[in-house]
Amino acid sequence: MLAAMPPTPTTPPDRGERRIRDRGDACPGALRLHAADDGLLARLRLPGGLLTRHQLCALATAAERLGDGALSVTSRGNAELRGLTDGCGAELAELLRDAGLLPSDTHERVRNVVASPLAGLDGLGSADVQLWARELDALLCASDRAAGLSGRFLFALDDGRGDVAGLGADVTLLAGADGRAVLRVGRHAVRVPATDAARAALAAAEAFLTAAAGAGTGAWRVRELPEGHEIGVDESLERAGVAAEPLPHVTGTERSAPGAAPEPPEDRPEGPGTGPLPGVVAGPDGWTVSVAAPLGRLTAAQLRQLLPAPANEVRLTPWRGAVVPGFADRGTARAHLDALGRAGLITGTDSPWWGVGACTGRPGCAKSLADVRADVTPGRGGLPVYWSGCERRCGRPQGEYVDVVATRDGAYRVTAHGSPVPVPSRAELEGTIATARTRTTK
């Protein structure tokens, strides 16, 4: 069974707004496969990026048996299988169900939940939002209305460190040290008890569906709602039995208003997208290994190597990496990090591949103007760099980065800090990018 489409309005827009789109949501899923130039593509939603050992092995098996032998980590911490063979849908679905990766056929594409990957591991956050992610996932799958969300609608659960709060989610929860959380939906912000955080997020999403149906413009995301169609967050929270404290809007000068929703902290570690840095992470209850996947790709062999016995959990991250908790001492964690480095993963910020990303490009994407993964050049330091095969820039990072986009003349256009950087020739592309990464913002 396929996931339900977003609701179709029964009345025309009442304010004369132009429809954004007239088609249903065709976002790929685990059951709705997308036909790409390199074969079929399946996208698996992994709330909080969580995978058990059994699930990780199931994905490795699926990649080897049905696909191109690798798994792509997306900018939402989800997983993609590419190069899938025609007619493999039933076998893939059986593999995923047996591994517990398809808790609801009707909701499998709406389980887009990112959560702070190191929550509960390094002692820095105000709440273990990975627990919120699991509760929210169960609530989503139990809600008939939630099945109408677009496959692009995103929830972000931030433990207070400010890592996923800036990922442009439709519904954001930011944990506070006072046992409460700030719920953000567009410009709307309220405080709710941390114990009700997951219920509040679902209520906000359902309120969006009501607003989207009323607008009648085919909006899939909060930012697509036209002016004048406010989301009834307060009413939805009241119906859900969640006590909420209103806060000022979080735009412009109101960000500094007394009682306004807190901004993500500015003193978090610097890195591409401010996600977990690769290396060994100490915590109050053990040690954690953090790695990144070169260009976001993990082979089946690398997937199996991620989890050493007796560890049973890995968290994929929106920065195309993986966090492996559960090591009793630093030496054991360090040994595993070194092993993953030998397997080809990024284990330190000194890697020339750290901060370098790319879309699929040719031959997998028909819209791409170049084989960007073949053209990518490594480099060290400065801003992240993202290579795109066309103007859509699929999978590009949030925040500031060096934008490298293929053009129709077989060359690339480089932009940094919002300004184009001259590229005299293809031979000088690598040096141009290196200069752009380290150029000071004016």
Image: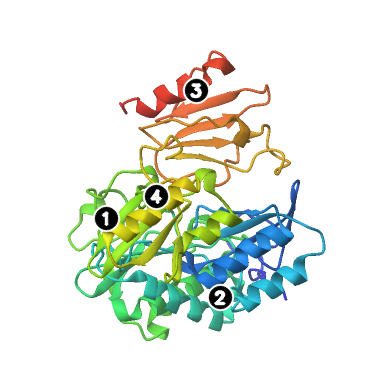
Instruction: Tell me the amino acid under the disc marked 3.
Output: Glu
State the quadrant of the N terminus: bottom right
Q: Which of marks 4 and 1 is nearer the N terminus?
A: 1
Q: Which of marks 2 and 3 is nearer the N terminus?
A: 2
- SS of the residue at dot 1? loop
- SS of the residue at dot 2? helix
Label 1 sits on residue: 263
Task: Answer with left or right where residue 42 lies relative to residue 213.
Answer: right
- SS of the residue at dot 3? helix
Taking the image as drawn, is residue 403 in sight? yes
Label 2 sits on residue: 146
| Relative depth, front residue between 23 and 146 | 146
Residue at (68, 37) in percent of width and height: 368
Q: In which quarter of the image is residue 289?
A: bottom left
Label 4 sits on residue: 338
Q: Earlier in the sequence, mark 1 or mark 2?
A: 2
Q: Give the foreground label among 3 and 1.
A: 3
Marks 4 and 2, how far apart in space? 43 Å
Q: Do the residues labelled 1 and 2 touch (CB within 8 Å)?
A: no
Q: In which quarter of the image is residue 354?
A: top left
Taking the image as drawn, is residue 25 in sight? no
Q: Earlier in the sequence, mark 4 or mark 3?
A: 4
Q: Which of marks 4 and 2 is nearer the N terminus?
A: 2
